[in-house]
Structure formats: C-alpha cells, structure tokens
C-alpha cells in the first residue's frame, strides 16, 4: 500500500484535499476507500470473529443454564430458536476468515446479524411471559454492542440498526402484554438510543479514516524526504562532471575497508592515474574539450575494472584514484596497464602534449599485501610517489612502488 500511495500523485492530491475539509465532511471514495478497507480489514475481521464467538458461547451457556434452572417446558421452547445462533455464527466466521468481495462479506454479516437478532427475539417469544420483553431488550443490547464495536461501512451499520428496531417493533406489536401505543413509544425510545449509537459509530469511523489519511500523507512526506536525502547523499558522493564517485566517497570507502586500522584484511592496490599535460589540453582546445576528455577517461577507467568490487573516484582536477581490493601486484599492474593502453587507444586529441598528440595517462601503483600493515593514507602516498616518478621519467607509463628498495630504485617501470 505504501508504495502505491507514494507513486500515485492523484491519491496524494486527494488525501490533501480531504484533509483540508472539515472532519465531519470527510468521505472516502475510489482507490483511497479501497486502501482504507484493506488497511483496517484484518482488525475489523478479528473483532467480528471474536464477537461472534462470544455470542455463540453465551448462547450455548444460557441454553444450558435454562435447562438446569427453568421449568422443562419453558427451557425446551427456548432450545430450538436458540439453536439457530451457533451455525449462523460459524458461517459468518468462515466468510470473514480472509478477504472476500465487499458485497459478500456485507451480505454475510447483515444476514448473520438478522438471524442472530431474530433468534434472540424468538427465544423470548417462544417462552412468553416475563421472557418476552426481556429477550427483546436483550436483542437490542446485542445489536448495540455490534454497532459500537464493528468498524464497518455506515450503510451496513444503519441496516443492522434498522433490522433490530424492525424486529423489536414487529414483536412488540404482537406482545399481548402491552398496547399498540406502548409498543410504538418503546420502539421510538430505543430508536433514539440506537441511532445515537450509530452516529457515535460514524464519528469513530470518520476519525479512523482521518487518521488513515494523515498516515498516507505522512508516508508520502517521509518517502519524499528519504528520496531527497538519497539525492543529496548521491550528490555529496558523486563527481558532477564525470558521474563517478568523488574524493569524499573514496575516503569513506577506504575508512570502511580498513576499518580504522592500518591493514586491509584481504590486501588491496591503489592506482593513482593522472592525465598527461592536461593543462596544455585545456589551454589549446578549451575547457569544454577538457571536460569531455575527463568524462571519456573516467568512462574508460570504469570499463577496465571489476564493477562488482573495484572502486573508481575522481580525486583531483585530472587525477583518478582506483582501489582494487584483493589483488596482488601482478594483477594490479595488469589492470593499470590495461587502463593506460585503453586511454591511449581511444585517440582523444591533445595536440599540445609533450608525450603524444593523443591523450595519455601516467599511473602510479602501490600494493598492500594481506599480511602487511599499511594505512590507506600511506598506501596513497606510495601511489602518489610512484605517479610523480612516472611523470618525471617520461609520462604515459605505469610505475610500481617498491618499498624495500632505495629511493631511486623504489620504483619499477612497467613500460
């Protein structure tokens, strides 16, 4: 339900329109009415089933006590009409075990209530005497309790109320113990109380519907807020030009993988990639062409890494950082070389470059073995140092940082 509301502007608009009205004027229609029924059905069905079970239990208990305490003839006269209730209730419970067509459930409940009320009335009518009017009053009490606790459509409630009053009037008119005027007066008296109960039930239903409308509106607003937060989070972690991750996101990823310690559990490699003579490209071809170059290079880098586990971010103006978890130095060098060759093969123009008339990359590689304790900052510094030396020694090449060697021998050229 919650997704239907979020994705349907018509429902959202209707919810706002209904909440702008006075509470007593709220009327649910169409899809919102269906959603409300679906929302409250389970609770309503449980209440109806529980009420039915209690009525059946009290009916059986009363009949049993009557057999023990009343004269046999009177008790037997009550038995047959009283026996109507249990099978009727069983049918209603079966219909209300799971959602059915509204007309079917309405018909079953109204028919069931009519037969239950008729049964209660007939018990008194059959016994006669003091039991006659007593059971008619019990019948009205049964109807009132149902009206109060059943969260059903108003039309169903009014129908049950009308049936109860109709039965009361019919049997009172046949009551030999009272006159016609008294029967009518008593019916009118009870009618005022029953319809006051119906009015109270209507108010309770409208308040429940209003609460439901607030719930729909709040869910929509929460969904909008969550969507806005997701967009902000995406903007905060994405480079707006290239569409790949930015430095902030990469820093958070490094912290997460290293767990705040000095060791990446499964080892990792970092590639610092820098576009050679990028300033000359901007100066010669313009910033628009420079931006296009950055977008193309970012795309090429992403195409040459594992999408399921490797991470690529734009780390500076023309710098890109690539994180390769769970690789050794041979695999890292292979990926770096593949990226370099792919950028060169793309033949992006850079006519003012000192290396080639095409865009090229210099890449510094640093590797942390699984058994080494190196912080991400140290690994990045090593990749930076390898990149710097790659620039110094001719550009368009991959250099691997060698921590065990002396300063000038700390790097191994791959090309």
Image (cartoon, helix red, strand yellow):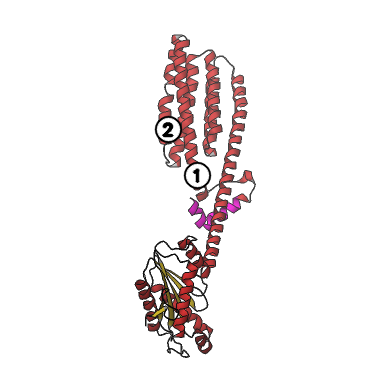
Give the image location of residue 24, x and y in percent. Answer: 63, 43
Q: Which mark is residue 93?
A: 2
Name which residue lies at 58% across and 36% down: 201
Q: What distance separates the C-alpha of mark 2 from that of mark 1?
A: 19 Å
Q: Is residue 220 above or below residue 331?
A: above
From what the image shows, is residue 350 above or below residue 17?
Answer: below
Which image quadrant: the C terminus? Answer: bottom left
Task: Indicate whether 13 appears above or below 105.
Answer: below
Q: Tell me the element at label 1.
A: helix
The kind of secondary structure the magenta stretch mainly shows is helix
The percent position of residue 354, horizontal first and vertical second, equals: 46, 90
Q: 10 Å neighbourhood of mark 1: few (<14), some, or many (≥20)?
A: few
Image point (53%, 48%), residue name: 29
Report which quarter residue 309 is drawn in.
Answer: bottom left
- Magenta range: 1-18
Residue at point 48%, 41% (across, down): 41
Q: Which mark is residue 412?
A: none
Residue that numbered label 1 is attached to: 39
Q: SS for tag 2?
A: helix
Q: Nearer the viewer, residue 29 or 214?
A: 214
Q: Is residue 80 left or right of residue 161?
A: left
Q: Nearer the viewer, mark 2 or mark 1?
A: 1
Can you give x and y, in whole percent of width and height, for residue 409 in the image?
A: 41, 80
């Amino acid at each position: 339900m919650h997704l239907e509301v979020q994705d349907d502007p018509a429902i959202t608009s209707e919810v706002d329109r209904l909440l702008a009205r006075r509470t007593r004027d709220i009327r649910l229609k169409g899809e919102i009415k269906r959603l409300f029924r679906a929302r409250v059905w389970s609770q309503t069905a449980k209440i109806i089933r529980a009420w039915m079970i209690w009525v059946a239990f009290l009916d059986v208990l009363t009949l049993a006590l009557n057999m023990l305490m009343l004269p046999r003839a009177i008790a037997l006269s009550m038995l047959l009409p009283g026996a109507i209730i249990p099978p009727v209730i069983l049918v209603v419970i079966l219909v209300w075990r799971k959602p059915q067509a509204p007309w079917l459930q309405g018909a079953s409940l109204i028919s069931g209530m009519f037969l239950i009320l008729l049964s209660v009335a007939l018990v008194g009518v059959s016994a006669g005497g003091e039991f006659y009017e007593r059971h008619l009053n019990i019948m009205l009490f049964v109807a009132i309790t149902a009206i109060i606790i059943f969260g059903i459509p108003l039309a169903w409630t009014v129908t049950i109320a009308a049936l109860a009053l109709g039965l009361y009037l019919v049997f009172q008119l046949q009551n030999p113990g009272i006159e016609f005027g008294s029967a009518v007066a008593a019916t009118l008296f009870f009618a005022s109380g029953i319809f006051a109960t119906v009015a109270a039930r209507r108010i309770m239903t409208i308040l429940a519907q209003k609460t439901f409308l607030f719930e729909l509106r709040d869910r929509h607003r929460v969904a909008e807020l969550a969507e806005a937060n997701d967009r902000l989070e995406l903007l905060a972690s994405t480079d707006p030009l290239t569409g790949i991750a930015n430095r902030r996101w990469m820093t958070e990823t490094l912290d997460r993988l290293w767990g705040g310690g000095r060791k990446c559990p499964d080892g990792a490699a970092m590639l610092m990639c820098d576009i050679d003579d990028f300033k000359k490209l901007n100066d010669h071809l313009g910033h628009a062409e420079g931006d296009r170059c950055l977008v193309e290079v970012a795309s090429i880098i992403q195409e040459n890494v594992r999408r399921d586990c490797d991470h690529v971010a734009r780390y500076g103006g023309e710098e890109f950082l690539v994180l390769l978890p769970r690789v050794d130095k041979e695999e890292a060098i292979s990926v770096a070389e593949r990226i370099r060759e792919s950028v060169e093969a793309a033949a992006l123009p850079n006519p003012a470059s000192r290396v080639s008339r095409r865009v090229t990359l210099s890449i510094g590689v640093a590797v942390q073995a699984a058994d080494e304790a190196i912080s991400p900052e140290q690994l990045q510094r090593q990749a930076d140092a390898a990149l710097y030396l790659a620039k110094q020694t001719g550009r368009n090449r991959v250099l691997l940082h060698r921590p065990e060697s002396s300063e000038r021998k700390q790097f191994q050229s791959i090309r």
